[in-house]
């Protein structure tokens, strides 16, 4: 039975839930998605996993605090273990090619993974991203420059983009900076 490190962490965009194996992040999302976290873990391990509280697994607390303090590259090389199909893995890992403060469209991401006709599949897959912020699906926007499709909510997406310095027309937020 695997024992996984578990961390609840406050952040400017809400409490984060983080699960790691000790070598890589398997889940990072908002507290609203705790049931999704357990569903994902059950799909990998059945009911045979245990979560143990960890203070700073993989220095994630420190690195995420640095990210929220403006050191965006602090999360760039955190090891991840996404699971998923080969297509999903390609989509999620391609997110790391979008620099902080910049955006890409779903179509650009589809082309980036060598499948330009898969724009909608890329959008659906981004919505299933198990590792928010580190795999920055918030940096993917609609072809017309609008903020679309962020599982964590469009207010969070706008906040993250604004925090990273993106000044697109849709970078409005009601969350405090």
Image (cartoon, rainbow, N blue to C red):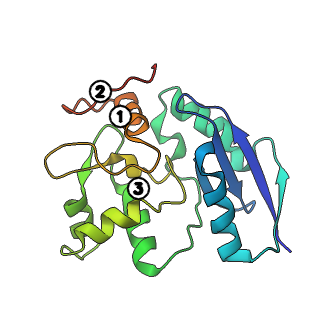
Q: Nearer the viewer, residue 146 or 32?
A: 32
For disc 1, the neighbor class at 10 Å (few under 14, some 14 to 19, many from 20) is: many
- Residue sitting at x 70%, y 55%: 19
**Helix, strand or loop status at disc 3:** helix
Q: Is residue 167 above or below residue 47?
A: above
Q: Which one is earlier in the sequence, the residue at label 3 or at label 2?
A: 3
Q: Are marks 2 and 1 in contact (CB under 8 Å)?
A: yes
Whole-angstrom CA distance, mark 3 to mark 1, is 18 Å
> Which image quarter: residue 110?
bottom left
For disc 3, the neighbor class at 10 Å (few under 14, some 14 to 19, many from 20) is: some
Q: Nearer the viewer, residue 24 or 130?
A: 130
For disc 2, the neighbor class at 10 Å (few under 14, some 14 to 19, many from 20) is: some
Residue 15 percent across, percent down from the top left: 63, 36
Give the residue at mark 1.
158
- Residue sitting at x 78%, y 55%: 5
- Residue sitting at x 32%, y 67%: 122
Residue 26 seen in the figure? no
Q: Which mark is residue 96?
A: 3
| Quadrant of the drawing holding the N terminus | bottom right
Residue 147 seen in the figure? yes
Number of numbered discs visible in the structure rendering: 3
Whole-angstrom CA distance, mark 3 to mark 2, is 23 Å
> Which image quarter: residue 169?
top left
Give the residue at mark 2.
172
Left or right: 141 as drawn, with respect to 70: left
């Amino acid at each position: 039975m695997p024992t996984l490190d578990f961390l609840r962490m406050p952040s400017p965009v809400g409490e984060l839930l983080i699960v790691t194996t000790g070598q890589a992040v398997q889940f990072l999302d908002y507290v609203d998605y705790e049931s999704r976290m357990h569903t994902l873990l059950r799909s990998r391990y059945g009911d045979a996993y245990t979560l143990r509280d960890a203070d700073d697994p993989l220095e994630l607390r420190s690195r995420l605090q640095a990210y929220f303090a403006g050191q965006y590259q602090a999360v760039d090389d955190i090891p991840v273990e996404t699971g998923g199909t080969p297509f999903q893995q390609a989509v999620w890992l391609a997110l790391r090619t979008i620099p902080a403060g910049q955006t890409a469209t779903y179509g650009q991401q589809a082309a980036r993974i060598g499948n330009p006709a898969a724009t909608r599949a890329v959008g659906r897959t981004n919505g299933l991203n198990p590792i928010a912020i580190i795999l920055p699906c918030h940096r993917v926007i609609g072809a017309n420059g609008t903020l679309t499709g962020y599982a964590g909510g469009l207010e969070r997406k706008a906040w993250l983009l604004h925090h990273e310095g993106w000044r697109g027309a849709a970078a409005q937020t009601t969350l405090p900076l």
